[in-house]
Image (tube, rainbow, N blue to C red):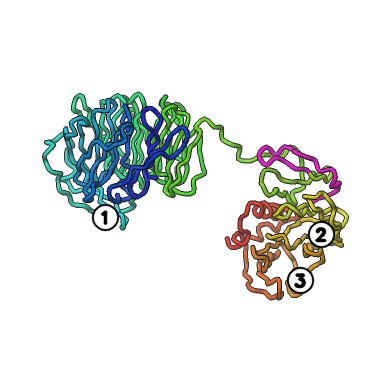
């Protein structure tokens, strides 16, 4: 979703789709109401040309007519009709209304900026800037222009044709360069060009002012004025990942570093104290203008975020991503804690999540009792006293039915957890049963036991709870096992840093290699236990443990 915009009354949310169409949503109910189809397919990078009028429900968006000629469509949402088509010489990059809603500025991919009288639908002035080379959709490069194109910018005769420019290419490129924007007081028209330049045109005095841009800039991707029009924020494409903010009165600049990808969209909150930024690094960030630091970071997108808008009441932030998703965010929400500390000591062999992931089981270190905890707060939800005590390890099958408990006196108890009854008691023949683990589909149970300082693996079939012979499989100096998802292969890491895959049906070794990272954990017994804990947690989160070896 390259562009999103709220109507002035806050009732409509317009979402630009890849291909050119505009979806219109009820902003309150989040229900799709209608869609404005593109007259012909619009190139992907043109899709960010979308803006609501500050007054009324007039929507402007880059489009093409039935013959494929580029236009800006003006749509009156109240009357549900297109009231005008403004012709352009190239596909439209950006559109912006002045605060009085009487003037519209547009930027084409040939670099032409046009200022339109909305009522008469006539061009009041136009001037050239550096062009965006649409052919670079298929080739990397950065647009620059020759000296003729880089001359003074100012109002020209509306009938004068755009100057022809020679285009060259160089380094990194994103297809979101170029934007126009009016200040909130209507005095300034800001033009962010396809090259590294920002220019401000004073609409009252005719003064032309250039904003100093760092040499690392790779073209202007987004602009944002503060509500009082005293500050201007900008971002500079693939060449610079910082958010830049200028005080237009004192002409001072400060930066907000932190994004790891190019910045696609910026927007100030209604009070001007918070600046929101969206990035290709898949994060949405809030910056405190007063403290000049990061206030909050939102994560959850699985692709680049391309668009950003505040709701009119300031209660929501909406983002549009490259994968087509639109998300609502609460800007006042408190950041969740990165982790939760359990209020009491527990055995770290086998924290096991229930299938709904809302609660998990642990074994207390003091009594060896099994307790169920809330997955968010880590507080005790229930103490499962019917299971007894003196345990030091556990695991729960993926379907939540079988619960295995290992104690300090050679026993492995297996319970039907859903029915609350003991099924069998397996003898491990060694004290300190740890490392209990069900196979992915729950057909096997294995455990590690410490027999006179030597770690021993044992496997049982869940169907009849008989021990499975691993004849042919090398279990000497065992370190850590892992099942394949189809339960046909067993991977075993050894204390000498080697790892091997074994066919559980034939006992034949399929592959082996040396993995030096395993040796990092073979220092003391305590380090070995930490290795087990880390891997069990990874398994509970559904990550592939085999990849851990490969790294």
- Across and down, in percent, residue 43 comes to 30, 51
Above-or-below relation of 549 to 111 = below
Q: Is residue 398 left or right of residue 240?
A: right
Q: Which residue is mark 3?
A: 470
Q: Is residue 112 visible?
A: yes
Q: How packed is label 2: few (under 14 Cα within 10 Å), some, or many (20 or more)? A: some
Q: Residue at x 67, y 43 (%)?
A: 358
Q: Is residue 178 left or right of residue 358?
A: left
Q: Is residue 313 left or right of residue 84?
A: right
Q: Which residue is mark 2?
A: 450
- Across and down, in percent, residue 5 comes to 37, 36
Q: Is residue 329 left or right of residue 254?
A: right
Q: Which residue is mark 1?
A: 135
The quarter of the picture where residue 243 lies is top left
Q: Earlier in the sequence, mark 3 or mark 1?
A: 1
- Of residues 430 and 482, which is closer to you in this image? 482
Q: How packed is label 3: few (under 14 Cα within 10 Å), some, or many (20 or more)? A: some
Secondary structure at badge 3 equals loop
Q: How far separated are the C-alphas under marks 3 and 2?
A: 18 Å
Q: Residue at x 21, y 39 (%)?
A: 86
Q: Are marks 1 and 2 in contact (CB under 8 Å)?
A: no
- Of residues 324 and 476, which is closer to you in this image? 324
Q: Look at the image and tell me in which quarter the C terminus lies.
A: bottom right
The quarter of the picture where residue 107 lies is top left
- Across and down, in percent, residue 542 comes to 62, 54
Q: How far separated are the C-alphas under marks 1 and 2?
A: 66 Å
Q: Which residues are magenta?
A: 371-392
């Amino acid at each position: 979703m390259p562009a999103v915009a709220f109507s002035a009354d806050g009732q409509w949310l317009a979402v630009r789709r890849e291909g050119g169409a505009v979806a219109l949503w009820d902003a309150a109910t989040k229900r799709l109401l209608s869609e404005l189809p593109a007259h012909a397919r619009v190139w992907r990078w043109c899709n960010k040309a979308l803006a609501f009028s500050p007054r009324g429900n007039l929507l402007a968006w880059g489009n093409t007519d039935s013959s494929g000629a580029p236009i800006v469509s003006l749509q009156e949402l109240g009357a549900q009709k297109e009231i005008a088509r403004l012709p352009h010489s190239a596909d439209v990059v950006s559109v912006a209304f002045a605060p009085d809603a009487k003037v519209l500025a547009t930027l084409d991919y040939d670099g032409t900026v046009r200022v339109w009288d909305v009522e008469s639908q006539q061009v009041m002035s136009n001037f050239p800037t550096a062009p965006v080379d649409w052919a670079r959709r298929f080739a990397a490069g950065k647009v620059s222009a020759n000296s003729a194109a880089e001359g003074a910018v100012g109002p020209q005769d509306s009938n004068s044709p755009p100057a022809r420019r020679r285009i060259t290419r160089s380094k990194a490129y994103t297809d979101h360069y170029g934007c126009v924007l009016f200040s909130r007081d209507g005095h300034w028209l800001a033009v962010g060009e396809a090259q590294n330049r920002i220019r401000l045109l004073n609409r009252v005095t005719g003064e032309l002012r250039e904003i100093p841009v760092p040499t690392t800039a790779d073209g202007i991707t987004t602009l944002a004025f503060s509500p009082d029009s005293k500050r201007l924020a900008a971002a500079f494409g693939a060449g610079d990942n910082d958010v830049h903010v200028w005080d237009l009165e004192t002409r001072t600049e400060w930066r907000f570093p932190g994004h790891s990808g190019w910045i696609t969209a910026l927007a100030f909150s209604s009070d001007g104290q918070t600046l929101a930024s969206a990035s290709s690094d898949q994060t949405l960030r809030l910056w405190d203008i007063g403290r000049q630091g990061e206030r909050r970071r939102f994560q959850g997108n699985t692709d680049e975020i391309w668009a950003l808008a505040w709701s009119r009441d300031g209660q929501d932030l909406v983002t549009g991503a490259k994968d087509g998703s639109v998300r609502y965010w609460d800007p006042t929400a408190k950041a969740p804690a990165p982790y939760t500390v359990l209020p009491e000591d527990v055995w770290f062999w086998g924290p096991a999540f229930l299938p709904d992931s809302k609660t998990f089981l642990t074994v207390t270190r003091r009594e060896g009792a099994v307790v169920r905890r809330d997955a968010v707060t880590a507080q005790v939800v229930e103490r499962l006293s019917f299971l007894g005590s003196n345990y030091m390890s556990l695991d729960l099958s993926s379907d939540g039915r079988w619960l295995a408990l290992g104690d300090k006196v050679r026993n492995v108890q297996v319970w039907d957890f859903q029915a609350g009854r003991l099924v069998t008691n397996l003898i491990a023949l060694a004290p300190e049963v740890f490392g209990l683990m069900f196979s992915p589909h729950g057909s096997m149970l294995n455990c590690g036991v410490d027999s006179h300082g030597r770690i021993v693996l044992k496997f049982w079939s869940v169907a009849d709870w008989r021990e499975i012979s691993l004849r042919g499989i090398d279990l000497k100096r065992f370190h850590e096992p892992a099942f394949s998802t189809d339960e046909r292969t067993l991977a075993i890491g050894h204390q000498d840093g080697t790892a091997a895959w074994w066919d559980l049906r034939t006992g034949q070794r399929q592959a082996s290699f040396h993995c030096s990272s395993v040796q990092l954990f073979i220092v003391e017994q305590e380090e070995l236990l930490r290795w087990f804990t880390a891997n069990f947690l990874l398994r509970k989160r559904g990550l592939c443990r085999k990849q851990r070896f490969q790294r």
